[in-house]
């Protein structure tokens, strides 16, 4: 990042800070004791993955740290997130549903700023900064990105995260099956040999010479240990491991290649500057180290602080952690080749990916333990891990449901992440330490990821209602009472989740992923050929490799590939452009924006479930899994009077929530009216993609100014 670019970004950030200042009234302190906050985000870890939320699940990852925290705190058995990561994370740090923030799906490179967190949101770090807290986030960000964002690498700073060290990607970079270009001869690469990004020997890493970018080289090193140390294991162009350092072999290395969790683009925001460089260290281990150093720094200075440790795992693609970051005795199964994706000797990698997902989650659990012990928040005793820092609250949760191939029964892998069904939105949530009374208990009340926004404020002694800028609406409900009072009633009469398609700089074409006997099509989420194919899909848009027919959307593919007339016997389903759900704690209503072709084939936009009677309710704390056979609207039987009343009430609640989120076009500063501050913001962003690009054509110009002026005045 050049210094001139850094200065320009700092100037833009300063301008927005000036516009933001009058919208942020002085924080009103609620009084009482305040606490430090350690927030841990487990990426793509749904309720199906943990013993505390899936007590009958088989072959679950071993998570003794999370179990110990639950035993000394509270686990929430009916916690909802949003169906995908970016909507969840923005809702988490703003207390607002996606329909208010504009962030409805995960951000990919074509995503316009309207689908990224607005620089005018009152985010948790801004709220806590006014209360004198230090704040840092380490790891995955994904509230905003550098692509199409006027703040570029300073995207975290632009939304209040002034201290950030991690990745702006949605997950680890793609794995490098070429072993840093060593398996390539020009453009011809043997990329079907080593899918984990390092050479393997059957069920174990190969032994190779290990080369480093500074010119050092070590003979005979375990290939995975080499990668973890920041090196590249040497192989010949045919994949044969090279055990002795060789200058010619080293010369073939493409050092710029990224490689999953071991080589990734690291972005740092600090003191108003943003920089990016290549990191050659396992991301989850690095993030834990950063959190340890930060917490110890704050404790030594006597500061109040909040540290967010946002792991990149368990997001795909998966790579094995090193043995020292796994439970003792962990070994790759002897009857399976060590593989992370499709390679020459692996027809279906799902079984391997499930093992790697388990290992990733187990490794994260070990990293959490390292942080707790190294910072004095906990200590090891004969009884195991014991929290010792009464001034600190530890919160661990998953940001959405698990990815389809990793889902554990009795949850439903075909209704997982990216859906508003229980498997897609029910997540583990554990809170321990600080003011928690009667530890070791469960709370079965409805809670939502937006509620954590209010909990953060409560722990910092901040009155959220008094601190909100004019015109700002939040959806969070109080949570602190659950920590203080085991008999506290539910703060919620309903719970809500949603996602919807992003505003993109280019059209998105169909991608079809086949799994569990279903051909699932999306034309809104996997927005590029690379995203599609790396997630195991077939791309039906324009392509330069192995061209398939080009279809404009999923309905075009539905007809063109023969699903409509039955010549293609596959079971076709759509990943909807939008989906939302609401529950009263027992009954649940799901709305899906069905594509017209499926509506014509008889599909319904609405599903209605009695969660008390759904699959596995008896073992999942009374709330079962909303599998399609439990849809009361599709049963052919009329609803009972009780069911009809619940359906009518939930339909009215869903309509009321979504009606309340009608965007105010031109209100860039989110203060409830279109006025001079919004005009100043639009002019600041003139000429490129921004939140001032009101017609979503990727440029902020006179057309957008005309739209703003036509909406001048209070929001209607």
Image: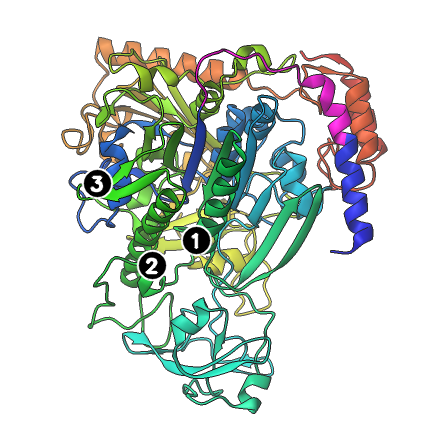
Residue 18 sits inside the magenta stretch = yes
Residues at marks 1 and 2 touching, judged by CB atoms closer than 8 Å: yes
Q: Quadrant of the C terminus?
A: top right
Query: Alpha carbon of mark 3 to alpha carbon of mark 1: how far?
Result: 22 Å
Pick the front one: 90 or 639: 90
> Are the residues at dot 3 and dot 1 in contact (C-beta closer than 8 Å)?
no
The region drawn magenta spans 16-34
Above or below for 705 versus 275: above
In the picture, the disc for residue 284 is 1
Lateral position of residue 146 relative to residue 578, left or right: right
- Camera-nearest label, 3 or 1: 1
Disc 3 element: loop
Q: Which mark is residue 95?
A: none
Q: For the residue carrying disc 1, how many other residues have a C-alpha within 10 Å: few (<14), some (14-19), or many (20+)?
A: many
Alpha-carbon span between mark 1 and mark 2? 10 Å
Above or below, 106 against 511 in this view is: above
State the image coordinates of residue 263 (x, y, percent, origin top left): 52, 64
**Direction from residue 49 to residue 690 in the image, left or right:** right
The spot of residue 184 in percent (x, y) is: 54, 82
Question: CA–CA distance between discs 3 and 2?
Answer: 20 Å
Instruction: Say which label, 1 or 2, has the lower sequence index.
Output: 1
Name the one closer to the observer, 362 or 144: 362
Residue designated by label 2:
325
Q: Secondary structure at mark 1?
A: helix
Mark closer to the observer (3, 2) = 2
Instruction: Let me know if residue 558 appears in the view.
Output: no
Read off the residue under disc 3: 51
Name the quadrant containing residue 671.
top right
Q: Residue at x 38, y 68 (%)?
A: 342
């Amino acid at each position: 990042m050049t210094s001139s670019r850094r200065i320009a970004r700092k100037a833009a950030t300063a301008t927005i800070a000036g516009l933001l200042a009058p919208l942020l009234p002085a924080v009103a302190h609620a009084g009482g004791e305040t606490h430090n906050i350690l927030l841990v985000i487990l990426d793509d870890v749904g309720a199906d993955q943990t013993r505390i939320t899936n007590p009958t699940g088989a072959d679950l990852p071993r998570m003794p740290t999370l179990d110990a925290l639950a035993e000394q705190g509270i686990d929430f058995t009916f916690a909802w997130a949003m169906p995908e990561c970016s909507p969840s994370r923005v809702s988490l740090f703003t207390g607002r549903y996606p329909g208010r923030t504009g962030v409805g799906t995960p951000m990919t490179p074509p995503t316009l700023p309207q689908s990224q967190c607005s620089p005018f949101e009152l985010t948790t770090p801004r709220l806590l900064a006014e209360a004198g807290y230090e704040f840092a986030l380490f790891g995955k960000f994904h509230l905003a990105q550098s692509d199409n964002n006027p703040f570029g690498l300073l995207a975290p700073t632009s939304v209040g995260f002034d201290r950030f060290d991690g990745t702006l990607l949605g997950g680890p970079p793609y794995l490098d099956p070429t072993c840093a270009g060593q398996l390539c001869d020009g453009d011809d690469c043997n990329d079907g040999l080593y899918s984990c990004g390092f050479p393997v020997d059957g069920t174990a890493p190969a032994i190779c010479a290990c080369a480093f970018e500074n010119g050092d080289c070590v003979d005979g090193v375990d290939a995975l240990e080499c990668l973890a140390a920041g090196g590249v294991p040497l192989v010949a162009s045919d994949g044969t491991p090279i055990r002795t350092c060789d200058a010619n072999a080293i010369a073939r290395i493409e050092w710029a290649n990224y490689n999953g969790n071991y080589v990734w683009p690291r972005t740092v925001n600090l003191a108003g500057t943003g920089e990016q460089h290549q990191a050659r260290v396992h991301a989850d281990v690095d993030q834990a180290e950063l959190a340890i150093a930060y917490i110890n720094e704050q404790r030594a200075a006597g500061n109040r602080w909040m540290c967010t440790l946002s792991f990149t795992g368990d997001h795909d693609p998966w790579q094995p952690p090193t043995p020292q970051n796994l439970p003792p005795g962990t070994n790759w199964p002897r009857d399976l080749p060590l593989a992370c994706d499709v390679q020459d000797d692996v027809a279906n990698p799902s079984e391997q990916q499930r093992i790697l997902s388990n290992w990733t989650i187990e490794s994260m659990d070990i990293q959490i333990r390292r942080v707790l012990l190294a910072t004095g928040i906990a200590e090891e005793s004969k009884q195991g891990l014991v929290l010792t820092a009464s001034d600190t609250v530890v919160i661990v949760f998953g940001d959405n449901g698990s990815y389809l191939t990793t889902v554990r029964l009795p949850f439903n892998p075909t209704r997982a992440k990216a859906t508003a069904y229980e498997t897609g939105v029910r997540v583990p949530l554990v809170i321990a330490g600080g003011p928690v009374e009667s530890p070791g208990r469960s709370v079965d009340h409805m809670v939502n990821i937006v509620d954590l926004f209010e909990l953060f404020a409560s722990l910092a002694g901040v009155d959220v209602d008094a601190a909100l800028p004019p015109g700002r609406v939040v959806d969070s409900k109080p949570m602190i009472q659950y920590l203080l009072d085991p008999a506290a009633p539910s703060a919620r009469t309903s719970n809500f989740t949603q996602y919807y398609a992003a505003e993109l700089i280019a059209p998105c074409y169909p991608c079809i992923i086949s799994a569990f006997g279903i051909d699932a099509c999306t034309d809104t989420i996997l927005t590029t050929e690379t995203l599609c194919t790396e997630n195991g899909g077939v791309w039906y848009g324009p392509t330069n490799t192995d061209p398939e027919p080009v279809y404009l959307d999923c309905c075009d593919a539905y007809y063109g590939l023969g699903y409509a007339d039955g010549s293609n016997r596959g079971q076709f389903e759509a990943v909807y452009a939008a989906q939302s759900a609401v529950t009263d704690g027992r009954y649940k209503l799901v709305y899906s924006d069905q594509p017209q072709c499926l509506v014509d084939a008889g599909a319904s936009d609405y599903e209605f479930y009695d969660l008390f009677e759904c699959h596995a309710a008896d073992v999942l704390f009374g709330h079962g899994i909303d599998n399609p056979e439990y849809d009361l609207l599709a049963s052919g039987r009329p609803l009972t009077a009780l069911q009809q009343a619940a359906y009518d009430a939930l339909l009215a609640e869903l309509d009321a929530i979504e009606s309340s989120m009608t965007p105010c076009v031109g209100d860039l500063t989110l203060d409830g009216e279109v006025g001079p501050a919004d005009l100043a913001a639009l002019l600041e962003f003139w000429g490129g993609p921004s939140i001032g690009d009101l017609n979503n054509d990727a440029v902020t110009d006179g057309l957008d100014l005309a739209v703003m002026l036509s909406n001048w005045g209070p929001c209607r």
